[in-house]
Amino acid sequence: MLVLGIETSCDETAAAILDCSNEQPEILSEVISSQDDLHSLYGGVVPELASREHLRNLPLILNSALTKSGVVLGELSGIGVTRGPGLKGCLLVGVDFVKGLALSTGLPWIGVNHIEGHLHAAALDNIALKTPYLALVVSGGHTEIVKVETLGKYQIMARTIDDAAGEAFDKAANLLGLEYPGGAKLAGLADSVANSRYTLPKVMREIDDISFSGLKTAFSLLVQRTAEDAVREPQVIPELAFVMQEAIVSALIHKLNLAVQATGLSDVVVTGGVAANHRLRTAVGAMAGVRSWFPSPTHCTDNAAMIAHVAAKRLRAGMRDDYSLEVAPRWPVEEVQAL
Ligand code: KG4
Ligand code: ZN
């Protein structure tokens, strides 16, 4: 069963072709084009520019994925495309492209929830990972802890009510003068020192959900207070980065621990762009009684293999979409159809 996946929900244009004939899918090709350089000029993703870029790139990316896999369209069994959540204009480019492709080829296709893709991405790289497990999805656009019972059955244990974890990293990085997206750069600075003379309040201990707004304000005030020291002493910026990284990671670990206790689950998947963070990986790995799992770096960030993977399971269960399907820019993952 050969399945094509298409992902255009934010600022990555991606296509992947998977052979899903066996329990463990085989990735025949995957092509991802990131728009980071385009958006870094503006300090964040500009939706209109992102959708135009998808429109320009998608046919090229698909061609490249087909060529690399040696598969021709007629050999495919079906197509999966991200239907939401994401930026409306970006989702429209992907979904309309797939509608056209399905019309011309007669292939069955299905709209996939982007978060559902992330929830199962670790299975692409870890054959031993089995449901049920807890997944911490931490990216530039999402932050949620989800109980994954089986494919299609999800319970939200905690979700951000304001910024995503990646956004918190990026905004803190911006305050330190680092170029967008600055999360990884802030992490690099933080990892270059062993500790910090500064402190930040412990956040999120009183609320059920996840919120980074208090921490952001506290960090912004700390950066203002230390601005003169930072000019004199090069060590100040890395120490500020360190204390912020510790605060974000410790808040996430606190929430994960609560979810582990509430569910009794011991397998924890960490996924999304922020899963690249070394400190977070180490902290999850050190959680008592927890077995931690991570997708490969390519499958942590937005990619089309995770979309093809979920699409294959849904198509195999007989699920199909048709031309009346609309994009769903806000589509809570717990509302997807169970299999
Ligand atoms: O999943 P992703 O590639 O795409 C979006 O959701 O847009 O996640 C990107 C996010 C950005 O906010 C980026 O700064 C953050 O992940 N990120 C990191 C690290 N690497 C990427 N944040 C902290 N530490 C890192 N090492
Ligand atoms: Zn994502």
Image (tube, rainbow, N blue to C red):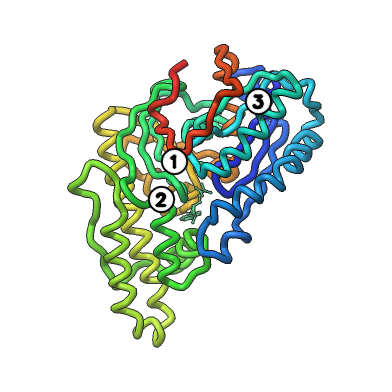
For label 1, the residue is 270
Image-based side of 333 in relation to 93, left or right: left
> What's the residue type where badge 3 is placed?
Ile
Q: Nearer the viewer, residue 299 or 114?
A: 114
**Which residue position holds label 3?**
79
In x, y percent, where is residue 97? 67, 34
Q: Earlier in the sequence, mark 3 or mark 1?
A: 3
Instruction: Name the residue nearer the viewer: 126 or 12.
Output: 12
Question: In percent of the image, x 50 and y 31: which residue is there?
Answer: 113
- Tag 2 or tag 1, which sits nearer the N-term? 1
284 over 115 or under it: above or below: below
From the top left corner, tell me how far across and down residue 192 is, in percent: 46, 68
Q: Which residue is mark 2?
A: 280
Give the residue furthest to the bottom. 232
Marks 1,2: beta carbons within 8 A: yes
Image quadrant in which you'd find residue 102: top right
Viewer can see residue 310: no
Which mark's residue is nearer the viewer, 2 or 3? 3
Callout in the foreground (3, 1)? 3
